[in-house]
Amino acid sequence: MRPNLPQWCHRKTLRSRLRSRLRRRLLADRRGATAVTFAFAAIALTGLVGLGAEAGNWYVMKRAGQNTADAAAIAGALTLGTASGASGCTTSLQTTAGTSGVTVANANGFTSGSGGVTVTVQAPPWSGSYTSHPCATEAQITQVIPTVFASVIPGAASSMTVNNVAVAEVKKLTPNCALALNQITVNGASTTISGTNCGFEANSTASDALQFNGNNASLAGTALATPGGCNGTVCSSLQNLMTNALPAVNPFTAIYNPSTNAGLSLSSLPCMSGGNITISGNKVNWTNPISPSWTVSSQKAYCGGNGNGATLTVNSNSGSNLLTFSPGTYIFSNISLQFTGGTINCPSCTCPLVASATTCTGVTIILTGTSAAKIGTLTVTANATVTLPAPVPNTASSAFNGVLFYMDYNASDSNGNGNAPVQITGGGNTVLWGGMYFPSVTANFGGNSNTTSTCMEIVAKNLTFGGNSTFNVAGCPTSMVSQINILTMLE
């Protein structure tokens, strides 16, 4: 018989049994192991996610650095592209190219000494396969990127260095026969304009920078380029057409630079007194040969019409049918030139008309005036026999080396009756050797202009072609020939 225990003793025994039962259940419970395992796994997973995000950030920074290096190299190359040729990439211009590249890098958020970044832009490249390319630019951007998650890996560095390198060069694709600072227009149903080993370019960015107004018109050369577009039914069939191209470099900026509106001032030169040119009303009379008005020791102009304008006309219908120049530079102020017949030449000039030349004598003709409306015009027709070469070099001013015709940049783009201020519609008897620069006006070339000259480099605000003409620059000094350029990423 069980003893009759006190009440408090029963309660103590019950509590002991409950504790024992809870202890056994707790020891048998495995649900907490999952939580502990997940806690340790979460730490590792967080580290992997962080490492992945950090690697992604490395890629983004690497990509941004490379894109900026490309842009810096291109900026430097475009600066060097303003040179007239490989010899034109001087040390001074190379330094400017480096500065241009660094400026672009800074604008993109990469500055040497900031955030572990080093930017170096140099021309020519200092290493690799292109150190002998004077017109190439190398850009190198070095980034020191700190590591956070990766640095906890045993043996890993606390930062990483990323190098980004790019090399760019503007290459001369082909010389230009003619460069329009704005637009080229080709008129006529079957007009054919050809370039012998040279091309044509219009620097306008407009959609009609190259305008063709004939169904069978053709402008053919080694390349036909424009930063803008081509308008006309023949555009789709043109060979060697390059739209959205780099603008061509104007080779005559030493005379007048349209981008800065700075040029040589010629309108206020004193007038020649006496000599072999006289003015009678609005007519110019002369005795052959006429002599230069601008020399090293005397800078003067032939002035016409007491400021009201005059015209020097050569034709076959009067006694004024022969105009002979002596070698030198001629400035005609308020005087127009009309060669509509007769013979205009320079028998004592030594520059060849159908070959290349490096040192020879010739003629430079400059049209200027006391106001824009009084600057003379230039007309040459097929009835005239015109054989004139330009001097190489020009002894009066090196800015006019190889230049045959120049019209003052203040001239208006109209001669008062709606016609272009420059009209050259010569035939087989017209042989003009040298550069022609008409920076503010339209130059119209028609007929069978200039088929034998080996140097006829034309630069004008606008160029209009009609008839069938052939152009050639093979005999020109390279410094006076514009180029069609292409941008190439070398590395």
Image (cartoon, grey):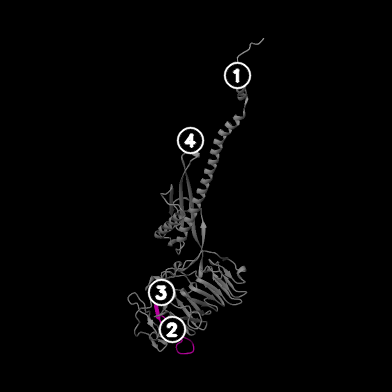
Q: Looking at the rendered structure, which numbered label has been put on residue 323?
A: 2
Contact flag, marks 3 and 1 (Cβ < 8 Å): no
Asked if the residues shown at circle 4 and circle 2 are in contact, with their CB atoms under 8 angstroms apart, the answer is no
Q: Which corner quadrant holds the N terminus?
A: top right
Q: Nearer the viewer, mark 4 or mark 3?
A: 4
Numbered disc in front, either 4 or 2: 4
Q: Decide if residue 249 is on the left or right side of residue 398.
A: right
> Alpha carbon of mark 1 to alpha carbon of mark 4: how far?
64 Å
| Mark drawn on residue 291 | none
In front: mark 3 or mark 1?
Answer: 1
The one of 182 and 49 positioned closer to us in this rendering? 49
Query: Which numbered disc flags the more N-terminal residue, 3 or 1?
Result: 1
Q: Nearer the viewer, mark 2 or mark 1?
A: 1
List the residue tagged with mark 4: 155
Q: Which residues are magenta?
A: 311-336
Residue 180, relative to residue 423: is it above or below?
A: above
Q: Which mark is residue 361?
A: 3
| Towards the viewer: 94 or 322 | 94
| Closer to the camera in the image, 192 or 371 | 371
The residue under label 1 is: 11
Which residue type carries mark 2?
Leu
Which quarter of the picture shows residue 388? bottom left
Residue type at mark 1: give it: Arg
Q: Secondary structure at mark 4?
A: loop
Element carrying mark 3: loop
Tell me residue 129's x, y (percent): 48, 52
Give residue 396's quadrant in the image: bottom left
Q: Closer to the N terminus: mark 4 or mark 3?
A: 4
C-beta proximity under 8 Å, tags 2 and 1:
no
Q: Position of residue 158 (x, y in %)?
A: 46, 40
Who comes first in sequence, dot 3 or dot 2? 2
Amino acid at circle 3: Thr
